[in-house]
Structure formats: C-alpha cells, structure tokens
Amino acid sequence: VNEFWPQAPDAVTLGQLATHHSGLPRLPENLLSKADQTDPYVHYGQSELESALAEVEPGVNSYEYSNFGYGLLAESLARNAEKPFPELLNDVVFETFSMPDTYVATSKEHTPGSLATGHNVLGDVVPHWHFQSLAGAGAIVSTLSDMTNYTKTLMRKSAEGDTTVEQLLAPQKAIEGCCQQALAWLISEDEDGKAYAWHNGQTAGFSSFVGFYLDGSRAAVMLNAQSIPVNDEAIKLLTQNTGNNK
C-alpha cells in the first residue's frame, strides 16, 4: 500500500485490504469528529485519509471488516490507474457489465430526483449518503436491473471458468463460524455442499444483498429502502430448493 501512500504502514498489502485482514480498524479514527450524522462520509477527503494513514497502528492480521480498508483499497487502485475512482469504476465495471444507471455517489449536487427514499430502522425518512476518499466502502448507487446485469455476467464468467473471475472468487481466508473470504466476496455452501458467493451492504437508509451459485445455476439480488438486515431472507431465497433455476 505504501507504494501509493508513503504515509501508510509498511506491512499493509492490497491483498490484506481486499480480504479484511489488514489490521486496520473498521473506521479511521479521524472520521467521526467532523462528521455530519446524516451524511457521515461526505467530508472525508484525501487529506483526511493521508492523516489517518500517518497515525494508524495496524492490529493483528485477523479478520476485521474495515470500511477504512476498502476506502483505502479503492483509492489505491485509482492511483494505480491514474484516474479518479468513480471514473475507474465506470470504465472497468459499469460499462463492461451493462450498468447504465449506476454511479458513485460523491456529490450531493448530482443526486437524481428519481432515487428511492431511504428509511432508518424505525421507518423514518433519512438523507442519502455521499462519499469522497472512502467511496470504496459503500458509495455505489444502482438499480435492480443493473445489479441483475452485473450478477448474471459474473455467474456466466464463473461457470465458464474465466480466469479473472476464478481469481476473484477463490477462497483466501477462513472466517470462523461463517464462510470463506475471497477477494471482497464471501463464499458459503448450501445444505447440499454447493458453493455460492455473496455480499451484503447497509447504510443509514438502505440495505442490499447479492448472491449467486458459482456454477451459474441461480442468483438472488435484493435491494431494500430501509436499513434493516435482509441476509436471512435473501439467502433463503437463493438456496431454497424449488427445482427451478432463476
């Protein structure tokens, strides 16, 4: 990592960031002191990230889910590509996977009026979130159609043995009591021992889940306009034995 960020600790690698084994905490220590509680990531730019990297002392390299780590990973990839992270994602992912309505939410000024309204756990309406240098941790705004296109393409590539997707989905670390950690994706098995990849996400007003079988047989995409967990329902939908592939 310190090839891109001289301030970063020497021992932290991109692979550790991608598997949540970097020792970085879930959030940078300097995030919350200036945060707007209704939009807590919007103020956090390059200077704040550099300051956090200069001061952080990574813990042990065991599993700890880290928004700090994924924001840093995204910005490192952007520096390697020599383009802003939103532009990189648009070029490499959104256009490639036929996702015309998907974007990285980095500005309140570019918030479409067609966005669904988010709700907190009590059902109250809450504002949308925006990101700067931690955008890799949750700034993507998408639609059911676009996420379906993304998932179907990954499924097809996985079933066909695409080498890049195989590397993406190859288990890297075991997470005790859960599953296998691949690069970003989590790999679990159903009751019949069939492997599927999945991931979820949540902000103050929304929650989401994407999962698909590695053999390309079945998938589930769930987007919810309330910040309540949808994992159990989505995994049940994905793994239920209906005799149909959908």
Image (spheres, rainbow, N blue to C red):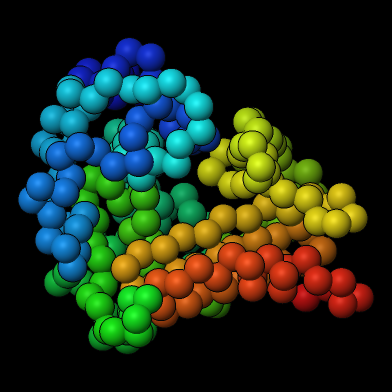
Q: How far from the left and from the top, in percent, is residue 49?
A: 19, 36
Residue 66 percent location from the top left of the image = 39, 41
List x then y, in percent, for residue 140.
Answer: 38, 61
Left or right side of 155 for 34:
left
Residue at 46% from the left image edge and 60% from the top image edge? 201
Q: Is residue 43 above or below residue 119?
A: above
Foreground: 101 or 223? Answer: 223
* Picture residue at 35% right of the left edge, 64% below the top: 203
Q: Is residue 197 above or below residue 142?
A: above
Question: Which quadrant of the view contains residue 192?
Answer: bottom right
Question: In which image quadrant can residue 218 be found?
Answer: bottom right
Up the image or down, 41 lies above or below 11; here it is below
Q: Quadrant of the N terminus?
A: top left
Q: Residue at x 50, y 27 (%)?
A: 62
Using the rendered image of the protein, determine whether residue 143 is visible from the camera's viewpoint.
no
Q: Position of residue 207 (x, y in %)?
A: 45, 69
Q: Which residue shows up at 18% across the image and 45% down it?
A: 31
In this view of the protein, can residue 116 be seen by the observer?
Answer: yes
Residue most extreme to the top: 10
